[in-house]
Amino acid sequence: MTQTTDQNIKKTVKKLVLVVFAMFGFGFALVPLYDVFCDITGLNGKTNTEAATALIDGVDESRTVKVQFISRTAQGIPWQFAPMTNEISVHPGEMKLVKFYAKNESTRDIIGQAVPSVSPGVAAVYFQKIECFCFNHQPLKAQEEVEMALQFYVDPELPEDVKTLTLSYTLYDITAKVES
Amino acid sequence: MTTEAIHDSHDNHDGEHHDHKMTGIKRWLLTTNHKDIGSMYLWFSFIMFLTGGAMAMVIRAELFQPGLQIVDPDFFNQMTTVHGLIMVFGAIMPAFTGLANWMIPMMVGAPDMALPRLNNWSFWILPFAFSILLASFFMEGGAPNFGWTFYAPLSTTYSNGSTAFFVFAVHIMGISSIMGAINIVVTIMNMRAPGMTYMKMPLFVWTFFITAYLLIAVMPVLAGTVTMVLTDTYFGTSFFDAAGGGDPVLFQHIFWFFGHPEVYIMILPAFGIVSTTIPAFSRKKLFGYSSMVYATASIAFLSFIVWAHHMFTTGMPLFGELFFMYCTMLIAVPTGVKVFNWVATMWRGAISFEVPMLFSIAFVILFTIGGFSGLMLALTPVDFQYHDTYFVVAHFHYVLVTGALFSIYAGAYYWLPKWTGFMFDETLAKAHFWCSLISVNLLFFPMHFLGLAGMPRRIPDYALQFADFNKWVSIGGFAFGLSQLIFLWVVIKCIKGGEKAPAKPWDGAEGLEWTVPSPAPYHTFETPPKID
């Protein structure tokens, strides 16, 4: 093998190893990229994680949107968790308050965390929460029960073809994560 | 050093090379010879093929009739998962790497791979990877049971405890593939004989060149994915856990960003093999060489922008579904170019039907069937019906078994005389071909109907109306499994002896590998050949 071939081989190897590391990094870069992409497009039905300020503009009374509430508990959390209103009709821009009921049915203290998701996904960014129990951890002592409030409005910019919004909450046990 | 000293004290060299060939196990452990490493890759992949095949037999035995009779559902899931992992990473990919190791240096007129020690290492870490994976069968909780696609949260929250073994095994397989791919690219870029320009390279070399780039681009992404699964499972991160702000659908995006190029990693080399064998037995030049190169490159490029067609049912927006549907269907264009070129190569050729050609023709026809069912799956509206049914199973087995595997057989039979120096037993090899051809269609074709009728995949039990077809499928499965033992017989017989093979046993064959004697000497092309 000649000297130049040897040098060329080293050069190519260096470049390729660089590509390998770059692509390994790219795999991880996909995580924040996906979040940004979903934030803009509402692709994965995630709603804003921060409270919206109350809307100043008027209410669009020409339209009515149906908002449905569903809830489920993730595996391993012994809570009762259900919306107290299953469905309401709202005008876009109109403020509404609904409540969810939760009860810790176990004999130990548990910290819960509700994670919201809106379907259809395109509507997620138009669902604005002014106050939501999902913004905070929800600690419940053994056998304790609580009514939790959700104050929201639907942005009047909501695309015309969306007539029904489904808001789904999944409740997770995050006790171990908080304590560690 | 001692070997050199002995050689130097020898006055009467026989004029041949100093082989420095060590004896016994050390020859294989420490070898840096591309032919030795190629052989080890091929043997390893065949052993893994039989291992994964044995698991397929368990699956088909359980599905022979409705109800649960032989294994429990959890073990059934372990079987489907590990069968998939072994066939993808243990059988098909190492078999291709073995062929690349054996043939690429000889085809480009190089004395060896560019990085021989790395080559040794990339092979020898593989047995460890699969030992880790297979060892998990004997541990509490058993082997991975979340599907070879290891979707979160199945592999994280609901894991049976095998996730760590799975992740480390995949890491090692990935490192091995990446090193093998770097070696292939470096060899092709720097070690070609003088005068062999890129557009004069055999198409076999081209397809491996492009495949190696795909591997370098996506195997690190797979490594990242399994790392995220590992930290999610054991270290409390929340990449894919909604409770901590992650998203399980993100897993599918990252996985399939690797996964779709991965399926082309398993088929592009197959295109290279049949593009070598079909011209040889048609006694014509390959039709449309440059269009073949460009088609391969376009398929490789398109593979990066179609991944979400695996995820049509995850609730994507309409625009996304349309984008991925059209991009996927676009792949049919370069693939069609290839199939057209193979048929055009055979057109008015002086065709003879030796065993490598039989496998190649079967490849063209059956791979095309797999391509068509792929087109059907690409249609978003109907994919909702086909998703996760046996139709998908039929599709990917047509492209991977009658596609990739048949091409490997074509290549193995084509180069076996070059490797062993003997002609293989034609009668036995034909028996292998016909038994495989008939049983493989009995095995996979009825799966199309089962899938269209709604039988879900990865389920150990099924509704009564699927019983008849499943019985036939299982019989086909057992027959196909047994047929592969004929191949083992042919190979062992061929190594032991037979009719002496001339340097070029196929009169239509072209390429530098046929200019050296059979069996190929331990060292070839130490002075590069001249290419005009």
Image: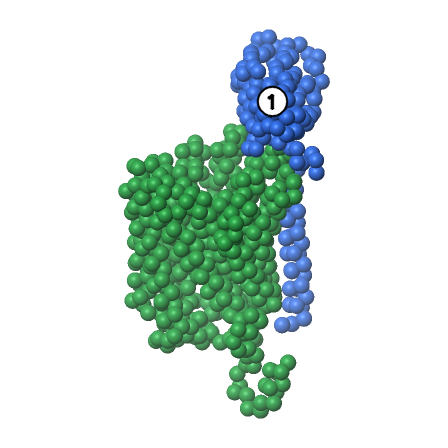
Residue A167 position, x and y percent, is 57, 22
Residue sitting at x 30%, y 58%: B434
Judging depth in this view, the residue of B49 and B213 nearest the camera is: B49
Residue B424 position, x and y percent, is 35, 70
Q: What colour denotes chain A?
A: blue
Image height of A61 relative to B21, above or below: above
Q: Name the residue that disc number 1 marks.
A: A103
- The chain whose colour is green is B
Residue sitting at x 66%, y 25%: A141
Residue sitting at x 53%, y 31%: B316
Question: Disc 1: which chain?
Answer: A
Q: Secondary structure at mark 1?
A: strand
Image height of B327 relative to B137, above or below: above
Residue B129 position, x and y percent, is 55, 57
The amino acid on which the numbered mark 1 sits, given as a three-letter code, is Lys
Q: Is residue B231 left or right of residue B133?
A: right
